[in-house]
């Protein structure tokens, strides 16, 4: 995939990147992207690749793709995923909640007892409604 650099996105000045779905080019908004920590830059690139590879406009699916590429590859990868989504999603509560559940699922699959209990209580709460 090719990356195109722009000084800013006048139509969406706070967005660090976007993907041209027809060409697969990732367009980077330098005025935002350059201010991000390195782990968040890596998340942004993997997220944008996810949009193209999965042929989706879904932010949650692109987040999941980024998580699949980055999870457990560095010491704080799961925390960095949550931090990245929380920072970039701004007011999108559904997206933030999805990111938390995705990370909890990975932790539960690794045997983390607290994550297992949290997921169980979430499922129990859904069945009561």
Image (cartoon, rainbow, N blue to C red):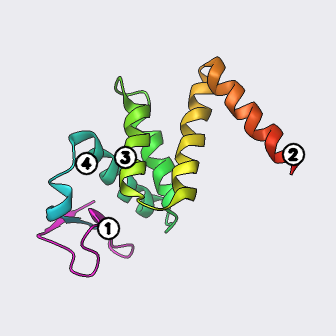
The image shows residue 91, relative to residue 86, as above or below, that is below
Find disc 1 in the rendering and name its residue: 18
Q: Which contiguous range is marked in magenta?
A: 1-24
Pointers 2 and 1 in contact (CB under 8 A)? no
Distance from disc 4 to disc 2, alpha carbons, whole Å, reads 38 Å
Q: Is residue 13 left or right of residue 77?
A: left
Mark 3: give few (<14), some (14-19) or many (20+) Cα within 10 Å. many
- Mark 1 lies on a secondary structure that is strand
The image shows residue 77, relative to residue 87, as above or below, that is above
Pointers 3 and 4 in contact (CB under 8 A)? no
Distance from disc 4 to disc 1, alpha carbons, whole Å, reads 13 Å
Frontmost of labels 3 and 4 is 3
Find disc 4 in the rendering and name its residue: 41
Find disc 3 in the rendering and name its residue: 84
Please name whichever residue, 21 or 84, is drawn nearer the observer in this view of the structure.
84
Q: Earlier in the sequence, mark 3 or mark 1?
A: 1
């Amino acid at each position: 995939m090719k990356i195109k650099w722009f000084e800013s996105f006048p139509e969406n000045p706070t967005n660090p990147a976007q993907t041209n779905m027809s060409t697969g080019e990732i367009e980077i908004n330098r005025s935002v992207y350059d201010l991000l920590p390195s782990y968040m830059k890596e998340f942004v690139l993997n997220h944008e690749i996810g949009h193209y590879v999965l042929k989706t406009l879904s932010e949650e699916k692109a987040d999941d793709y980024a998580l699949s590429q980055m999870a457990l590859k560095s010491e704080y990868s799961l925390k960095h995923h949550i931090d990245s989504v929380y920072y970039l999603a701004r007011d999108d509560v559904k997206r933030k909640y999805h990111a938390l559940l995705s990370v909890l699922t990975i932790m539960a699959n690794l045997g983390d007892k607290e994550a297992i209990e949290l997921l169980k209580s979430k499922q129990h709460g859904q069945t009561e409604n």
